[in-house]
Amino acid sequence: MAECVRSCAVHGGKLAKNLDWKKGQLAEAIRELLARYAAAMTDPGDAAALTGGKSTWPKSNPEVFDALLEVGNKAVDVRGADELRLAMRITETVLGVRKQSRAGWRLRARLMDAIGDDAATIAAYERFLALTPKDDLNVAGRITKLQESGERLAQTLQLLQKESPGSREFAGVPETELWAEGLALKDAGDWERAEPRLVAALVGMSEQDDSATSVRAALTDYVNLRLERDRGRLAGSTRLLELYADDRRLRDLDPIPDPALTGSEMVGLSDFRNLIAGKTICLVANSQRVGSSTMGQEIDSYDLVVRFNSYRIEAAATGTKTDIHATIHLHNFNWDKKVQTRLVFSGSHHQWRNSVRRRLVPGAQRYVGDRTLRWPVREIGRIGEDVMPSIPTSGFNMLWLLDFLDVNPKIDLIGFDFYDSGAYRLQEAMKLPIATAHGYADEKDWVMARAQDVTEMRISLR
């Protein structure tokens, strides 16, 4: 563990003053790990466990274990070669002391996916599923996609060999040599001799278990070369295009449900404004302050009730009414609960689109926010990282949006103590740590600067 933390510290030093957002998030995660590790080292018993190679330290120091996992996940997000090596070191450390760690196996799966090792990715995801009672993250769907994508790639290479039988003559020749020769012949205008070498190189890369990412990148280059050489011939190879497109779809997108089945209508900013205009509205925090309260009846008295992510219902404390469910794209909690409107927040249009396509439950909502509502603070407000460097929470995105629209006579925040009292969520979500990527203090300052009335349970913005 000590060596792993030292590796993290060294890498963190390399990230100083880096302007890349993802690397900035990694640097912040490393700082948090080092702070928690240093705090643990002040206790002689904890220090002995952390430095003595014992496998018991995650139990006595769960905050250090969680911080280490967070560094690993942020390193995978960056996807640089150095970061992936760091993530590998962390994964080996985590699974070395806790072989049944669900978070550890999920981190390994994400790492192997980033490296492009499909077999190892599937194996890690299967270990994760075996340890998980409920597949909230749709890991089974991810495994199916990887398997089907592998089948499409194999079918594509078989088709190319069939179209270019001369490629079999080059079996056993190093693929890098074949690829270089093929490109040189293509540049010289000799496509007839170039093509079998390029195809043989692709097949060789696959047989040598090169990363799926490398093989697919080379396949894309090959398709582009064929397109450049003879657009008509490529257009005539409908099976090749079909397999190639299907493989890309499986890698990049999740299955799209039939829109007719959802019974939902996409709404943009102006439509959402009209839906809520003139109505009293409250936003209910997922905090222990709410969970230990008796606010339920009062919460249900508002015209509109907004709840977030993995919200939990206990009638006396929370009320039972939910009109708007605002959720981050990452999680799969409460998507099946019936609401009038579901807003899905995400800083990535690609991830937002995938989440909406994969997670919407037919009949569970009347309206769904469209892309204009996916990231209110950044996209609508144009509030950049120079003003608010941390990732906006779902709660802040929602309350900022309501404040911006300014069409409600009453906007009340119920139980918003910015997690001072701890989290109050669905039981299966309680294992998730309170995210460190958010700037709770900055969000609190913004809210309190605009508050018109503040009590122990309620902050009124209108």
Image: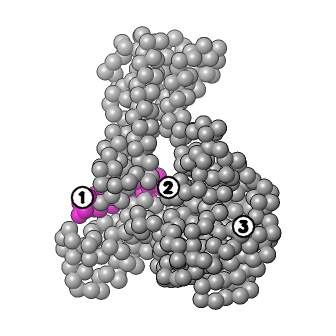
Q: Residues within 10 Å of mark 2 (few under 14, many from 20)?
A: many
Camera-side residue: 49 or 218? 49
Residue type indicated by callout 3: Leu
Please identify, in this view, whether the residue under mark 3 or under mark 1 is nearer the observer: 3
Q: Which mark is residue 332?
A: 2
Residue type indicated by callout 1: Lys
Q: Quadrant of residue 260?
A: top right
Q: Are marks 3 and 1 in contact (CB under 8 Å)?
A: no
Q: Which residue is mark 1?
A: 99
Q: In the figure, is residue 375 to the left or right of 130?
A: right
Camera-side residue: 259 or 402? 259
- In the image, residue 410 above or below residue 269: below
For residue 67: magenta?
A: no
Camera-side residue: 38 or 65? 65
Residue 333 x/y as whole percent? 50, 58
Q: Which residue is mark 3?
A: 401
Quadrant where the C terminus is found in the figure: bottom right
Residue type indicated by callout 2: Asn
At 42% across and 15% down in the image, what residue appears? 161
- Secondary structure type for disc 3: helix
At 62% across and 17% down in the image, what residue appears? 235
Residue 78 x/y as whole percent? 49, 56
Magenta region, mostly helix, strand or loop?
A: helix
Residue 384 x/y as whole percent? 68, 66
Q: CA distance from mark 1 to mark 2?
A: 25 Å
Quadrant where the N terminus is found in the figure: bottom left
Magenta residues span 75-100
Q: CA distance from mark 3 to mark 1?
A: 44 Å
